[in-house]
């Protein structure tokens, strides 16, 4: 289970990364796993007012380097494959 602080941090990070800081967004965490030195997440981002899917993202957070590596795409199968490959 993901705590609220991590959820909020990820949502703010992705909103800035995608240039959607001023939009009302909803983030759904589809998968979450611990990996070497951090965590990886598979996320779907929706626009709140329309419910429209904006994109899927894979994000790996490296606690040692204190950085995140996002990759976003509208193709869920592609993003799921990337998520499985992330160590």
Image: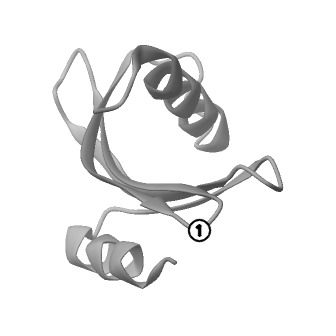
Q: Residue at x 40, y 79 (%)?
A: 82
Disc tally is 1
Residue 31 horizontal side relative to residue 24, left or right: left
Residue 26 horizontal side relative to residue 13, left or right: left
Name the residue nearer the viewer: 40 or 75.
40
Looking at the rendered image, the quarter that the N terminus falls into is: top left
Name the residue nearer the viewer: 29 or 53.
29
Percent x, y of residue 67: 76, 50
Image quadrant where residue 53 sits: top left
Q: Is residue 83 above or below residue 21?
A: below
Q: Is residue 8 above or below residue 64?
A: above
Q: Is residue 83 above or below residue 72?
A: below
Q: Residue at x 42, y 84 (%)?
A: 85
Percent x, y of residue 30: 22, 49
Residue 73 horizontal side relative to residue 1, left or right: right
Name the residue nearer the viewer: 48 or 78.
78
- The outermost residue toward the left is 51
- The outermost residue toward the right is 65
Q: Residue at x 56, y 16 (%)?
A: 22
Circle 1 sits in a helix, a strand or a loop, which is it? loop
Task: Using a 10 Å C-alpha cutoff, classify the residue at mark 1 as few (fewer than 14 neighbours), some (14 to 19) or many (20 or more).
Answer: few
Percent x, y of residue 84: 34, 79
Q: Residue at x 79, y 54 (%)?
A: 64
Q: Which residue is mark 1?
A: 36
Q: How is the image coloured?
A: one colour
Percent x, y of residue 41: 40, 53
């Amino acid at each position: 289970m993901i705590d609220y602080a991590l959820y909020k941090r990820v949502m703010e990070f992705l909103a800035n990364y995608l240039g959607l800081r001023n939009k009302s967004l909803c983030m759904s965490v589809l998968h979450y796993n611990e990996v070497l030195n951090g965590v990886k997440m598979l996320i779907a981002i929706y626009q709140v007012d329309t419910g429209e899917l904006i994109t899927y993202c894979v994000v790996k957070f490296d606690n040692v380097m204190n950085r995140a590596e996002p990759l976003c795409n509208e193709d869920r199968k592609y993003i799921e494959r990337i998520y499985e490959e992330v160590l």
